[in-house]
Each structure stands twice: as structure tokens, then as C-alpha cells.
Amino acid sequence: MKKSEFILLFLLIILTGGFGQGQVGEEKPKPLTRILFVFDASQSMYGRWQSDTKFNIASRLFVNILDSLKNVKNLEVALRVYGHQKQFPPQDCNDTKLEVPFAPDNIGRIKHVLKTIVPKGTTPIAYSLEQSANDFPPCDHCRNIIILITDGLEECNGDPCLVSHDLQKKGIILKPFIIGIGRDFAESFDCVGSYFDATSEKEFTNALNIVISRALNPTTAQVNLLDQYGKATETNVNMTFYDNVSGKVEYNFIHSFNSKGFPDTLEIDPMLTYDIVVNTIPPVRKDSVKLTPGKHKIIGIETPQGYLAFKTNGNSTIKYLPVLIRRKGDRETLNVQQFDQVEKYLTGSYDVEVLCLPRIQVNNVVIAQSHTTTVEIPVPGMAVIQRTTNGYGSVYIEDKGQMTWLYNLKDNLQQQENLFLQPGKYRVVFRSKFSNRSEFTTEKSFVVEAGQTVNVKL
């Protein structure tokens, strides 16, 4: 390869993000929004309402909204109708049908079906909602929404509130919308979902427009991670947004500041209530966070943090030495921190246990806001335990005439073991696996000094 060709190839690799770095921070694809319209075609919808029957007016205004959705990206719609197949009386509480399933470009089909329907039956709202669970084909990246349009209440002894809550808890649908035609049904439908009253044609149109806008458009929010002074200075930690009803993970964001030094703006689906977990050590939780569609939400969460570091009282560097971190007085381990790392924790008091030999317990270590607390331990020494045969043995620390077990030697190792030990007096007890009498046990005492190596020959 010529020199000029090599330089050109090198520049091309740099400009295209080569050397296996990959693309970081690419925008995630938008989810597919699926709206199931559940339309009331019970006998009462044949009644007069202002300029025409309720069904004709609702259908006409509904079609106008559908026409405006033809060119909306990442959207599919479907139509379920109830009360249109069997005459009332007698009452048929199974009278509901998915007339037009989800598919691209099916608005024309929905408009055609509406023209053929004649209201005639009863009002099985709960059963219709229950059956709607089967109307949404499996999808990993979809927002499933129900918009119920009705002029009456449940007539089949079902419980629409219970069914709606069950569908949300299972993660099948988001919180439904209900548009009540002719009179106010808020008291009965508030537990089902977000209710909108439409006592006139104008109010029905406004309600439809609001519902569609809320269903399609995200809302902005920012999370202020507050230090102990109430200022939004904490950042660079993952925040998990859970659906408050289903418990499903909806978002993960690693908190950041924008170019102006303020918490970044997030686009959040306003149709859910969220439980937010900020994954500090230990984590901080804020439950039942609600957003108002179209209104920027500032969410403040107290996460004051400081740093914890470890060092020896000499110049030695220790790697791969675990340290257990617990809340003061608590037995639960929050984190296993490596000795040579610096980690962030919520401000407060902690107990730490350095898993050296022997273990070192340091209680009531205080982490202060934006401050690095350093825990210092003595410089360890090394004991080189040498033996000529396999066998069974243990290392003990000696203190005030007492022996405390510390470590079991490996019984299949013939040559030597290197143990990093804290300064102190120790004893090793050993018997060859080829000796069948206990009296052949040998033992040796030795002293470990900081930063020094001692050879122990068995």
C-alpha cells in the first residue's frame, strides 16, 4: 500500500468512527402507538342529540379526527364496537366485536364499517374492555391505548374499573381515555381512566382533539438531583422509571447536564404515573410521580453524595482487595468496593469491612457532601509458606495467648502459598496427607511486619 493510500484510509477510519468504537448516543426509535377505539352502538345511541342521533354525530366527528391521523407516523388504529349485533330486548351481554383490527392504512375500513352499523343492543362495557386485551398483537415496543366513546354506563353487572386496572397492571394497555356523550359520567368513569365530558357537539370535538393529542405527544420533564443544600448539583447516575401500576420498567436515563449546566430535558409519556428509582448507593426512590400533558415537569429528588476511598499508611498499592460497605448498624451489604477504587455514596454514616487477612472493621465512617473520605489501613506484609508435600493445615493469628483461625492452606499445593497479612504474630499448623498419625503435626510461629516478606518453611 502506498503512503498516500495509507493516510487516506487512516483519515477515513477516523471520520467514520472506526477502530471498533461504535456509535454512542444514537436516538432510540420511536415506539409504535396503537389506539383501539371502543365505540358504543347500544340502543341509547340511536336517541336524539342536538342536530342528529348521538351515533350519527359521534361517528361523523370521529371520522373527521380519523382523517387527520392518516399521515401520522408510528401510529396504528383499530375499532371495537359493542351493542350493535343483537336487538335489545332481550339483553345480550356478550355483544361486542373487534370490527377492524390493527393494520397500517386501515382508516378507510373503519369509516366504511361505521356507515354499516345500526345501534340496537345493550352496554357491556366491562366485557368489551376485557375482550380488548386480545385486540393488541404481541409487541415489545408499542404503546397500547384505549379510547372509549359511550353515552351510558355498564348494564351487564360488570366492573369496568376493575377490568381497566387489571389490564394496566398486566402492562397490556396504558390508562384509558373515556369520552361521555350527552351527560356527565365522571363519577362512574374516573376509576376507569381519564374521563372527558361531552354534553355538546363542540365539547365532543374538543374532547377528541385533547385525547388524541395526549395519546400521541410526549411531555417534557427534568429531574433535579439535589445535594444537601437543595441545589441540583448531583449527576451521572442512572434513573429508572417504573410504571406505578404494572411495575414495568419504562425508561432508563443516566442523568446529565446540558450545555448550559442545567439538568437535561427528557421526553416522557404523560399517560403513566411513575415510580422513580435513582440508582445511587444506596438507591433513592420517589413514588407516584404524575405528569401534566403539555406542561414541563420539574422533579426534585434528594440525593446528596460524597466519595469513599481507601489507602495504606505507606506507599503500597493494593489491588483486588474487596471491601464490604454497609449502612451504620445495618447487616445488609450495600456494595463490594475494590480497595483501589473511589466510589460515590449518599451522605451519612457507614460501616466498612476490609476483606484482608485478618479482616479490618472500621465503623461510623462519615460521608460528607462532595467530600472524599479516606479510610487508611496498615501496610500489609507477605508470608511465603513453603512445604515439600501436600497436606492439611491452617494459619492462625496469635493475640494474648489465644489462637484465632484465619486461613486454610490448600491441600493439593506442594510448593508454596503467598499470603498478604496485616502486621502481627501468626502461627501455621500443618500435617502431611501421607502421615496417618496426628502426632506428626508440625507448627511454626512467625511475625509479619509492614511491607516485609517472611519465609515460613514447614
Image: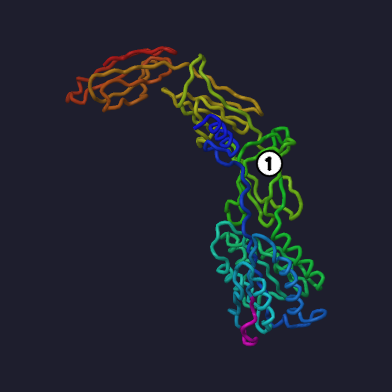
**Residue 164 located within the stretch drawn in magenta:** no
Q: Quadrant of residue 457?
A: top left
**Residue 12 visible from this viewpoint:** yes
**Left or right placement of residue 66 versus residue 237 in this view:** right
Q: Nearer the viewer, residue 33 or 240?
A: 33
**Residue 160 visible from this viewpoint:** no
Q: Which residues are magenta?
A: 81-91
Instruction: Estimate how packed mark 1 is, as few (under 14), some (14 to 19) or many (20 or more) residues with alpha carbons within 10 Å.
Output: some
User: Is 106 above or below relative to 458?
Assistant: below
Q: Nearer the viewer, residue 220 or 115?
A: 115
> Which residue sits at x=69%, y=59%?
216
Q: Quadrant of residue 71?
A: bottom right
* Residue assigned mark 1: 301
Q: Position of residue 295 (x, y in %)?
A: 76, 52
Question: Please, what is the three-letter code of the amino acid marked with disc 1?
Answer: Ile
Q: Position of residue 70 (x, y in %)?
A: 69, 66
Q: Would you say the magenta stretch is mainly helix, strand or loop?
A: loop
Q: How is the image coloured?
A: rainbow
**Residue 89 located within the stretch drawn in magenta:** yes
In the picture as drawn, the residue positioned furthest to the left comes out as 436
Q: Position of residue 84 (x, y in %)?
A: 64, 81
Q: Nearer the viewer, residue 141 or 23?
A: 23
Disc 1 is placed on an element classified as: strand
Q: Quadrant of residue 271?
A: bottom right
> Which residue sits at x=69%, y=83%?
43
**Left or right placement of residue 346 versus residue 326 in this view:** right
User: Is 23 above or below relative to 359?
Assistant: below
Q: Position of residue 343 (x, y in %)?
A: 57, 30
> Which residue sits at x=68%, y=41%?
301
User: Is 219 above or below relative to 283?
Assistant: below
